[in-house]
Image (tube, rainbow, N blue to C red):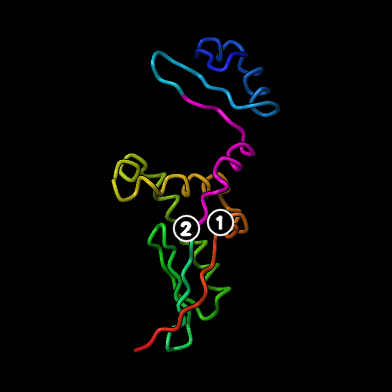
Amino acid sequence: MNEIINSTEARKNWSEVIDTVVRKRPVFIKRNRDVMTFLSLDQLDILLDSFRLTITVLNEEDGTYTGVIEELDLLSNADTVEGLIENLAFELADYSEEYMGNFDMYYHSTNRKAHFPYIYRVIAHEGELDKIKSMFNIKAEEKIHA
């Protein structure tokens, strides 16, 4: 198979295209002047592996913990750091669903376009909370002073 195949060729040899993507390499498909890529989940994981999220954890005066996902401006609060991480994973999953459900709006918003690789990584592993949590880099806790 060539590096870029036309859509008619891809349609005629659909099984071969899928086998190539799953067992060998990504495939580029061209229709008129539009080009798209077709890749496996494993290939996508490698491609998006460097898109990690920084969580800043703040120890509140009331003993709870507030966490902010810096790259996405998502936040949550919980009684424990473990609970906070769990909450943030759920928040991220919900935001990812919303982003994809309103993709045209979010992707074309200047302040949210850069969220796309993180969102796509989450959507690729929908329902796999441990995979979502593996995206997190936790910053050292900071104490909030009044």
- Closer-to-camera residue (142/27): 142
User: Magenta span has 130?
Assistant: no
Quadrant in which the N terminus appears = top right
Task: Count residues near mark 2 (Cα–Cα under 10 Å), then give few for <14, some for 14-19, many for 20+.
Answer: many
Height in image: 29 above or below 85?
above
Label 2 SS: helix
Label 1 SS: loop
The image position of residue 123, as x and y in percent, is 51, 46
- Residue 131 vs residue 4: left or right? right
Question: Which quadrant would residue 101 be assigned to in this image?
Answer: top left
The image position of residue 144, as x and y in percent, is 40, 84
Please report contact status of discs 1 and 2: CB closer than 8 Å, yes or no.
yes
Please name the residue shown 58% across and 10% down the image.
Answer: 12
Q: Which residues are magenta?
A: 36-53
Please name the residue shown 49% across and 55% down the image.
Answer: 93
For label 2, the residue is 92
Please name the residue shown 58% across and 53% down the image.
Answer: 127
Q: Amino acid at mark 1?
A: Met
- Closer-to-camera residue (20/104): 20
